[in-house]
Amino acid sequence: MRQFIRLLVSPRPERPAPAGFWNAPMRRFCARALGVYLMANCLLFTQGCAATEFYQREKLNDRSMQFDQDGGLNYLRQKIEAAREGSLGGFGSAEAGGCGCQ
Amino acid sequence: MPVTTMRHRAAHRFVTIIVVALVVSYGSSLNAQQTDNNAQLDIFVFNQEDHGGNKIQNEDMLYVGARASAKLKVNNVLSIRPTISGALLYAGGKPDVPSTITNATTTSASQRTTNRAGGKSDYTPVTTSMGFDIKPIGSDWTLSPGLFFSWQDNYVSRGLDFSASVELFNGNFIPSITYGFRWDSLTAGSLGIEGIFGFSGEDGEGGEGGEEEAGEGDEGGGGGSINRLETRWTHNLQLGFTQILSPQWRLNASVQYTLQHGSLGAPNAVVTLFDTSDVPVLFANEKLPKIRNRFQFNTRVRFSPVTGWGIGADHSFYLDDWGILNVAIEPQVEGYFVPEVARWRVWYRYSYQWGTRFHRGHPTREFKYQTDDADLLTFSTHSGGALFYFRLARWGGLDWMLRVSGYAFTRSDHILGYGALIGIEFDW
């Protein structure tokens, strides 16, 4: 655990600052926007969880609200992305990654 | 073996897989009850180009395949979820090895074996799984055991999965626990049919066993040697929940821990050593620890302002004891052109990965642990795609649907890829 905490707080190697569009003010703006966005997400957790009855779930039951609605595409993305990174989006499994095979 | 013969054999396997997939899809449809059933058949192609990354490692790849899956309600208690997929994988090309590297053709780290797949270039990966959903009558629990098997010439994986979830508060809160186990065998050459059982197969296609160079000390698990059978075990435990926040909001969060042990590198992966003038002079074997502890935290949010429209965002935070830290965010939007007939979904994903501490930059000597694996280094990824979904017709007692999807990614280390998928789906 101590190792993980050290990882979190230790400085990370910075990439050289690119010129042009992705300059320092732009990165600061994006960092702040990301912070606001994450805070907004955290607020979701503080919402009251009022019970939603079955007859109120028309929108929730629609295909557009499912977390994994396309098995074939998920499979392809896991093959391509999960085998190449430590994680994958919001639905990755930490089983793969970094070995080139899954 | 001549390359053309190998490709004919691979193509033959691929056609066989397609036929089996079709039979599984259609056969499943004949033996199920008349409700809550679904079958899908997808054909996909993906091309990856390597214009950077690790220059000694060529990650060019062409991946063409098909996948069939189904969800079948056997009775009021049991549903089954069979899947099978097969593909042709053309991996790598000749990497650009500097002529100053003196042992490029005489060690296990030879030029021919430094592509990612371990020296061979054509593969026919086949993956199949069978899941069961058991929900006793009158119970709010769902138990989901599963089996997993994946085979390709140099890599075999077998696994067991078990998941349990329960609906609480009228389904407003669904906690779940999932455990998965994988047992992998991998080698630089060919495992052959014996690989299914974890034995080393034929020795022919890896080739250079006589020129093998022993890893020094071999305290790490990744000291590569040609055609040596390597083994890896993976345990994955995931705890999560889905919460309905309101008639418009749905939230999912999960935390998972993965323990891997065994051989955790790629067979015959190499690290380049430099002299004091920063000239690459030697290849050394990649060496990685035999244990990896991995943690991941995910949240997923969906919001529907209008029926049929959904806005979502997925987030991921990943950390492991090799020093890799990865964060990702994936916003997405889904809607329709014509309600219930033509739908679309677009998504974008950004991730940033801080690389492992076992990457040594331009080392002049060997370390206990060392890697140049581009996938373990620092990079950012932009990816995105679109999915279009059309309800075609009701024919043969089935509702037929068509899916078309495009997908692409680009990494800051100049590895990029793009692909497409077309699939049919039918409900009955």
Image: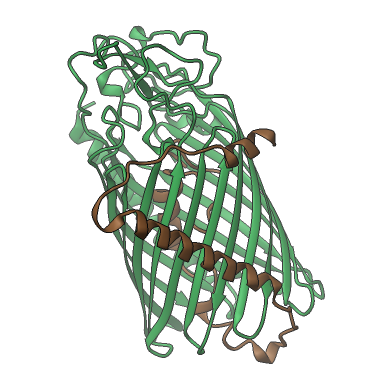
Query: Quick one: B65 or B201, which is closer to the camera?
Result: B65
Residue A73 placed where, x, y %?
Answer: 41, 62
Residue B109 visible in the snapshot: yes
Q: Residue at x 58, y 55 (%)?
A: B130
Question: With respect to residue A78, does B414 lie above or below?
Answer: above
Q: Residue at x 59, y 89 (%)?
A: A58
How many marks the image carries: the answer is 0
Q: Residue at x 50, y 57 (%)?
A: B83
Chain A, which colour?
A: brown
Question: With respect to residue B107, does A50 lie above or below?
Answer: below
Residue B393 visible in the snapshot: no
Specify the quadrant of the image occupied by residue B332: bottom left
Residue B428 placed where, x, y %?
Answer: 51, 80
Q: How was the colour assigned to the protein in this rendering?
A: by chain
Question: With respect to residue B321, does B370 lie above or below?
Answer: above
Residue B343 placed where, x, y %?
Answer: 38, 81
Compared across the picture, whether B300 is left or right of B107 comes to right
Residue B168 placed where, x, y %?
Answer: 79, 73
Chain B, which colour?
A: green
Q: Residue at x 70, y 72 (%)?
A: A46
Specify the quadrant of the image occupied by residue B81: bottom right
Query: Quick one: B263 or B247, which is closer to the camera?
Result: B247
Which image quadrant: the N terminus of chain B?
A: top left
Compared across the picture, whether B174 is left or right of B419 comes to right
Compared across the picture, whether B260 is left or right of B202 comes to right
Residue located farthest toward the right when viewing the structure as drawn: B138
